[in-house]
Amino acid sequence: MQILVINAGSSSMKYQLIETDDKTVLAKGLAERIGIAGSRVKHQFTKNGTTGEKVVEQDLPDHNVAFEIITQLLTDKEDAVIPSPEAIKAVGHRIVHGGEKFSDTQVITEEVKDTIRALIPLAPLHNPANLIGVEAAEKFFPKAVQVAVFDTAFHQTLPEHAFRYAIPEKFYTEDKIRVYGFHGTSHKYVYNEAKKFLKNEKLKAITIHLGNGSSMAAIDENGHSVDTSLGFGPLCGLVMGTRSGDIDPSVIFHMIEQLNMPLEKIKNVLNKESGMLGLAGSSDARDVATKYNSEDSNAKLTFELYGYRIRKYIGAYMAALNGVDALIFTAGLGENSVLTRSYACKHLENLGIELDEQLNVEKNHPDAPVEIQTAASKVKILIVPTNEEWQIAKEVSELVKRF
């Protein structure tokens, strides 16, 4: 089955066309700067065993125009990967927030769209763009089944003692303030890949998704997420590229009352000016690593603080799971940053976690799951490349086949 996977942002749209029978990526690309000057579509495709690339630079005033260009590229006379839009049987959409309503993948109906729309206050930057992507896909692929895969769905197995905040109950019952968690598609994918790799059907694991946005999840032997570091929104938990992660709420009160900072400014500081950027002057870990290798003290502090926060969550999640079989590193930094993994695993020997520093270097940036623990380590330490697009395509395929 050929499934088009869409990840629509407010000014961009990523896509992959996947043949689910053999996991082949027939085409992928990115429409960027939608509604902004300098927009373009970068398209890569594979045909008859060869790979090609095209770049279309033209105004993309909205997502409909972007979809029109993408459709033309997919069905181009010379380099077509599909004969017509009708060849695509389903379109899978990454939807960031499903609230408490959606705990699994859903065929998109008007009712589903209405619910996604009602959840916009919980994801004001993402759900509107996701809906725009859905409506554009409905126009250009009218015969395809449109399917929603929710970032929050995987974490709907959290027990109440993990997802509730200790604030008056009405804020939960009336305003739905609770832990939702994110990156669920990635956490689910790498957990299942690790389970197959280790041949352990009852794997207890801590998944560590480290990118510009980062999160961790505690996953029990039944494959259920029982805790996760991102909560009501994407700001808490780990140190990230530009986000602060966990911070004492009293700091915010102090900024308002003593520093006379407006709330909008504080939101901007914590979301866009903090994390690695605030500590070391760059949100790109590669830049920070270069500074680290030049003996920059702020860069050294950044990796120490970044790793320390991860270790705190490892300890907490080992308690939540009553022991763990594996740590799983994934996403941009998790797969590609030797320093990040090194600092994340320091001083954990008494917990049975021992990183092999040589393997950590040798196995960096793998294209399949690899182990990087010492022979004496009681806990496996894995790097598992994530593939959220394939996970979405797989879930869409499984759902569509049931109809």
Image (cartoon, rainbow, N blue to C red):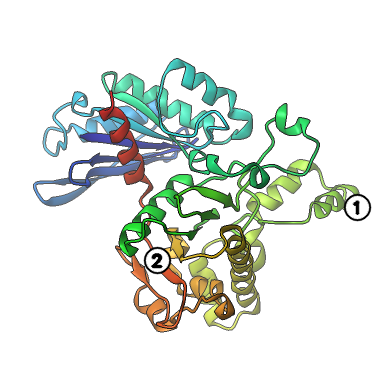
Q: Position of residue 347 (x, y in %)?
A: 59, 80
Q: Is residue 257 above or below residue 85?
A: below
Q: Quarter-wise, where is residue 109 in the image?
A: top left
Q: Position of residue 101 (x, y in %)?
A: 54, 28
Q: Nearer the viewer, mark 1 or mark 2?
A: 2
Q: Give SS at disc 1.
A: loop
Outermost residue to the top: 110
* 265 with respect to 317 (left or right): right
Q: CA distance from mark 1 to mark 2?
A: 45 Å
* Amino acid bearing label 2: Ile
**Residue 298 in view, yes or no:** yes
Sequence-wise first label, 1 or 2: 1
Q: Residue at x 38, y 50 (%)?
A: 189
Q: What residue does disc 2 label?
A: 383
Q: Give SS at disc 2.
A: strand
Q: Residue at x 61, y 56 (%)?
A: 242
Q: Residue at x 41, y 55 (%)?
A: 191
Image quadrant occupied by the N terminus: top left
Outermost residue to the left: 48
Q: What residue does disc 1 label?
A: 258
Q: Position of residue 54 (x, y in %)?
A: 24, 44
Q: Position of residue 337 (x, y in %)?
A: 45, 70
* Amino acid bearing label 1: Gln
